[in-house]
């Protein structure tokens, strides 16, 4: 349920997982764009004044919060972040010394966080294991896992914790005030009074333990964090990042792995684990954060209830101070390390420690803009040069990372031939030298500045809580005893940067490159060389270590381990008492909104195409546009080309612009343009929308998304039209580069996120829609990418002809307009202001307004379906071999047949399985990092999945036993447990959305044919769930039609499973 964040990873916020459900890629993008306002990018356009004015909240009530006092707290600071209408008061609890930042805004998505400075001294993973463990019961809430009970039955919009290299954060968010304070109480009691300090079984479960059930068996290591980190250390990208961080920080806490090294984790004793909490989890070492529209005095009152039991502690604050790493290298250093791979390609990263004293605000801003100039887009000079060099297949690193005490700059290449390793380092240095000599042109600077300022002022975090973005931005300074509000402001720093650029032009950036990179000898180069035997060696090393331990144990010691194993399993399997369960605060069904939420949509046919407008109260002067083109006339054989085609539209140039100039035009005039694919089954006309279908009616669109201020939509639409009609498809070197990068990306993803690929593979066996998805993004897509790369290198004319054919088909003058749409989201003023630009755009598009019509996609079988059915894989059990120390285990099939009706209660049951049975048996007892399930209402497909799993065959057995457990649950379930399950399901349905997300949601509901009546019926069925629905679902699991398995794992683990009787066809992924 947590996330591990390394210094080197954090610029891209490579968090790992929220309990079995990977943190969505979209969320990571939101975080990396918006969290780090301390170093965000600032520029100017006059039209941004309208954004600022509309973004600032009404001051009447918010100003009053600055005057709120509480007898238990003293006020340290009052401040207003005018940029976002945030009224901030920094308090200090008089008795305990805890600092509390109260941020009053008009945001109903309320956020609470408590952060401790937790610098580890070794790589036992103590900070990470403790982060897992404190949420396993506490003084007031003694159940085994209050966290899971909150997941099961709250309306939370965020519920998580994450470990940095030097701090640990616990965060909750909710739009419901009662729910919000319930969550706060559980989290606060957990961090200060965890059961884990007195019950060593928690440390054993979440961290590590020796497991033995019979003396004749070998000893094994088990533990959630232990297995999680084995998965992390199986990832070459993660190994490279960790080695890079360690190389730059030999003398402080960043030299060790706060997440834990699997080889070192078993060195952590329970006593050291407990002492770590005693040392660092004291209020004096805490930073407590609130934001949203709840009552400020109530915040203080609630916290005082917990803090008043503590006196101040200089020990916690003194021992948690982070030591500065000096720039001590007289000359750059180099390291070569192995990584598990069947390939012959190396990885290389060049790394700098940027500062050994605090940045000034001017330096922070300048570095962030410089990072965008060098690495921010595919046309940025350093990233572009590396990718076009032919020295490697994909860029790695990401540039600046500045969320910790000291900033680093990292970049390199994957897929490098051994003889080119030195060439990568030389090219990076040479490129930087050329930039210093030649500088950046005005368009490059203007583009980077505008792109970043737009993001900063827009502050659109989607469904991710804005308050959490504020908290993490604030924490980048506050945790190091600096002002928590200064990093949230930008106007002053913006003015200073503009003045500098006006006076010195690009010199402000080139001087920084020269000083901080080229003349900086505190640099390291890390080379990872592939090893075909490393995985096997590490497995054998662990086996030898465990054998040695067992051989040195006395009989009574073995008996003790057997007894502790038994006791731990009994504890894990035991149910919480009704009295303990009753301590967890919860909502009642009466607290829920029984009505669905609908979003505005105004549909019209204009110029021969569908135009939808979504009007909201305020979108901060920004217009959001999504333009779609129908894909259904593309032959299925070219469907795997569509992801490449989409990228080519954006990255090879268009019309008069080369790729660099096009990117700069987008940056100067818009808040961003992107191209994506949208393929989904839709409701079939004439059928009950609750009925399962074969998913043969589909919508398939290519979508160009863009946003800009209202007075820039003319430029926005011109650029959207330009990439669609005039993208340069004939760039063979660029296409080869893209395909190499995609191949490397897929290979890494299959190894590190195998659960998602296992799911796609299983779905591809049951419906044509599932097959189509898999050939555009699954394991089969990797094979397609390899074939396309071969064609691009050896038969370019044929591949170019295919790309050109796709575009000509999309823009067929006879019918293309009928398949086009434009979805616009904005406030009233925005929609009125953009209308002339909309009219000009629509009239300029190709095609006849009264041309041919596409089929009715909500009624007729999609053209791809018949072709797909002929190519769909047979239903069989497959095991895919990759270098890894963990497994990703999937099993699934259809539990509803075509024509059967699915009641909304089924979603409640499926969700309960995820947070109940699978959590307990796959994660808690099995030691996997995640165990979960998915259920498709429209297809009737149900799938089990595990993530970073130490087991394979045992996990499949757990899946097979699920129906029996569910059947028993249906008999034992009381009303409280049932209501908890319903509340959690409703919470999933009612997440917070931004205005542009609401607009797109409204449009996709229309496009897929989903009616408001069906949505209300579904909600009513969820609210009416009964124990008998759990029984019915269990019967369907037992009767699953043609179940099949898909597993991503190591060769050894798969062969062992086969030897134990799990029949699978084994296939190498290489």
Image (cartoon, rainbow, N blue to C red):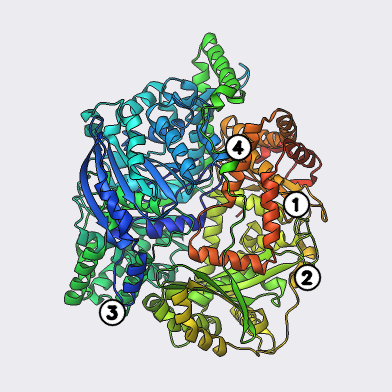
Do the CB atoms of the residues marked 4 and 1 lie less than 8 Å apart?
A: no
Q: Nearer the viewer, residue 175 or 678?
A: 175
Which quarter of the picture shows residue 539? top right
User: Pointer 2: residues within 10 angstroms few (<14), some, or many (20+)?
Assistant: some
Q: Nearer the viewer, residue 609 or 1041?
A: 609
List the single residue furthest toward the left: 503
Q: Nearer the viewer, mark 3 or mark 2?
A: 2
Q: Nearer the viewer, mark 3 or mark 1?
A: 1
For mark 4, what is the residue? 980
Whole-number angstrom distance, CA of label 2 to CA of label 1: 19 Å
For mark 3, what is the residue? 442
User: Pointer 4: residues within 10 angstroms few (<14), some, or many (20+)?
Assistant: many
Whole-number angstrom distance, CA of label 3 to CA of label 2: 53 Å
Whole-number angstrom distance, CA of label 3 to CA of label 1: 56 Å
Mark 3 / mark 1, whichever is N-terminal: 3
In the image, residue 593 lies at what x, y percent? 58, 49
Whole-number angstrom distance, CA of label 4 to CA of label 3: 58 Å
Q: Nearer the viewer, mark 2 or mark 4?
A: 4
User: Pointer 3: residues within 10 angstroms few (<14), some, or many (20+)?
Assistant: few
For mark 1, what is the residue? 940
For mark 2, what is the residue? 859
Which quarter of the picture shows residue 694? bottom right
Instruction: Give the secondary structure at mark 2.
Output: loop
At horizontal 74% and vertical 35% (from top left) the residue drawn is 963
Do the CB atoms of the residues marked 3 and 2 lie less than 8 Å apart?
A: no
């Amino acid at each position: 349920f947590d996330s591990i964040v390394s210094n080197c990873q954090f610029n891209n916020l490579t968090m790992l997982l929220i309990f079995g459900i990977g943190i969505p890629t979209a969320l990571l993008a939101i975080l990396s764009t918006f969290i780090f306002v301390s170093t965000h990018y600032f520029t100017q356009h006059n039209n941004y004044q309208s954004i600022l004015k509309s973004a600032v909240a009404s001051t009447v009530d918010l100003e009053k919060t600055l005057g709120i006092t509480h007898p238990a707290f003293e006020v340290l600071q009052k401040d207003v972040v005018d940029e976002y209408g945030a009224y901030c008061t920094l308090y200090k609890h008089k008795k305990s010394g805890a600092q509390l930042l109260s941020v009053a805004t008009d945001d109903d998505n309320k956020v609470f966080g408590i952060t401790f400075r937790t610098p580890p001294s070794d790589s036992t993973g103590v900070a990470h294991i403790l982060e897992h463990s404190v949420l396993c019961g506490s003084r007031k809430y003694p159940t085994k896992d209050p966290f899971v009970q909150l997941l099961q039955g709250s309306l939370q919009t965020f519920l998580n914790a994450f470990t940095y290299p030097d701090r640990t954060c616990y965060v909750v968010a909710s739009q419901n005030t009662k729910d919000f304070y319930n969550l706060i109480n559980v989290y606060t009691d957990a961090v200060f009074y965890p059961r884990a300090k007195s019950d060593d079984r928690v440390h054993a479960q979440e961290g590590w333990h020796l497991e033995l059930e019979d003396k004749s068996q070998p000893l094994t290591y088990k533990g959630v964090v232990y297995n999680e980190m084995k998965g992390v250390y199986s990832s070459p990208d993660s190994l490279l990042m960790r080695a890079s961080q360690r190389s730059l920080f030999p003398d402080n806490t960043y030299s060790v792995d706060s997440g834990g090294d699997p080889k070192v984790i078993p060195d952590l004793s329970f006593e050291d684990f407990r002492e770590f909490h005693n040392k660092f989890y004291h209020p004096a070492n805490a930073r407590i954060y609130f934001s949203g529209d709840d009552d400020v005095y109530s915040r203080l009152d609630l916290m005082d209830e917990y803090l008043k039991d503590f006196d101040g502690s200089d020990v916690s604050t003194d021992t948690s101070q982070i030591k500065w790493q000096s720039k001590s290298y007289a000359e750059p250093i180099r390291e070569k390390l192995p990584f598990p791979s069947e390939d012959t390609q190396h990885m290389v990263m060049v790394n700098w420690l940027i500062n050994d004293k605090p940045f000034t605000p001017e330096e922070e801003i300048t570095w962030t803009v410089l990072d965008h100039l060098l690495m921010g887009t595919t046309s940025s000079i350093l990233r572009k040069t590396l990718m076009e060099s032919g020295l490697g297949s994909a860029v790695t690193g990401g540039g600046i990372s500045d969320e910790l005490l000291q900033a680093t700059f990292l970049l390199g290449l994957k897929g490098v031939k051994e003889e080119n390793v030195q060439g990568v380092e030389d090219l990076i240095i040479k490129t930087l030298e050329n930039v210093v000599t030649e500088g950046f042109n005005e368009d490059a600077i203007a583009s980077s500045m505008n792109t970043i300022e737009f993001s900063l002022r827009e502050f659109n975090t989607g469904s991710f809580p804005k308050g959490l973005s504020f908290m993490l931005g604030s924490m980048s300074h506050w945790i190091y005893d600096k002002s928590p509000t200064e990093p949230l402001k930008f106007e002053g720093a913006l003015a200073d940067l503009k003045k500098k650029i006006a006076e010195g032009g690009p010199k402000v950036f080139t001087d920084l490159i020269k000083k901080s990179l080229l003349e900086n000898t505190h640099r390291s180069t890390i080379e990872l060389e592939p090893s075909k035997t490393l995985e096997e060696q590490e497995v054998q090393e662990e086996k030898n270590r465990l054998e040695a331990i067992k051989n040195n144990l006395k009989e009574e010691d073995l008996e003790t381990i057997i007894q502790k194993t038994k006791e731990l399993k009994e504890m894990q399997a035991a149910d919480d008492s009704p009295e303990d369960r009753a301590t967890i605060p919860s909502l009642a069904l009466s607290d829920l909104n029984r009505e669905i939420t609908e979003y505005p949509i105004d549909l019209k046919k204009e110029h021969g195409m569908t135009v939808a407008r979504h009007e909201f109260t305020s979108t901060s002067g920004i217009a959001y546009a999504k333009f779609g083109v129908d894909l259904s006339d593309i032959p299925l054989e070219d469907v795997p080309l569509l992801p490449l085609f989409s990228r080519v539209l954006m990255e090879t140039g268009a019309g008069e612009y080369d790729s660099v100039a096009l990117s700069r035009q987008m940056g100067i005039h818009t808040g961003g343009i992107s191209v994506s694919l949208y393929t989904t089954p839709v409701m079939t006309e004439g059928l009950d929308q609750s009925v399962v279908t074969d998913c043969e009616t589909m919508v398939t669109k290519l979508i160009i998304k863009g946003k800009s201020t209202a007075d820039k939509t003319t430029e926005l639409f011109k650029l959207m039209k330009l990439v669609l009609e005039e993208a340069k498809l004939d760039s063979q070197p660029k296409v080869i580069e893209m395909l190499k990068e995609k191949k490397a990306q897929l290979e890494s993803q299959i190894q590190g996120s195998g659960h998602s690929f296992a799911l796609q593979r299983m779905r591809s066996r049951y419906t044509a829609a599932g097959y189509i998805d898999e050939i555009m993004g699954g394991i089969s897509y990797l094979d397609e990418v390899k074939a396309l790369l071969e064609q691009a290198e050896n038969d370019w004319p044929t591949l170019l002809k295919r790309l050109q054919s796709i575009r000509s088909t999309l823009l067929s003058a006879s019918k293309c307009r009928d398949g086009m749409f434009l979805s616009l989201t904005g406030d009233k003023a925005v929609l009125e202001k953009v209308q002339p630009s909309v009219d000009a755009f629509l009239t300029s598009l190709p095609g006849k307004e009264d041309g041919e019509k596409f089929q009715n996609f909500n009624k007729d079988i999609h053209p791809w379906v018949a072709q797909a059915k002929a190519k769909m894989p047979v239903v069989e059990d497959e095991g895919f071999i990759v270098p890894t120390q963990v497994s990703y285990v999937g099993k699934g099939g259809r539990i509803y047949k075509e024509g059967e009706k699915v009641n909304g209660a089924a979603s409640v049951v499926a969700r309960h399985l995820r947070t109940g049975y699978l959590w307990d048996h796959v994660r808690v007892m099995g030691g996997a990092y995640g165990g979960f399930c998915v259920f498709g209402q429209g297809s009737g497909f149900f799938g089990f999945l595990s993530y970073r799993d130490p087991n394979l065959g045992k996990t499949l057995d757990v899946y097979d036993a699920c129906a029996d457990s569910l059947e028993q649950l249906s008999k034992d379930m009381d009303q409280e447990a049932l209501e908890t399950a319903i509340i959690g399901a409703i919470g999933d349905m009612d997440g917070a959305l931004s205005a542009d997300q609401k607009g797109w949601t409204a449009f996709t509901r229309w496009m897929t044919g989903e009616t408001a009546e069906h949505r209300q019926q579904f909600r009513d069925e969820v609210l009416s769930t009964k124990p008998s629905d759990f029984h019915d679902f269990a019967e369907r699991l037992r009767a699953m039609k043609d179940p099949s398995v898909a597993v991503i794992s190591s060769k050894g683990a798969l062969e062992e499973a086969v030897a134990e009787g799990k029949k699978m066809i084994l296939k190498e992924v290489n």
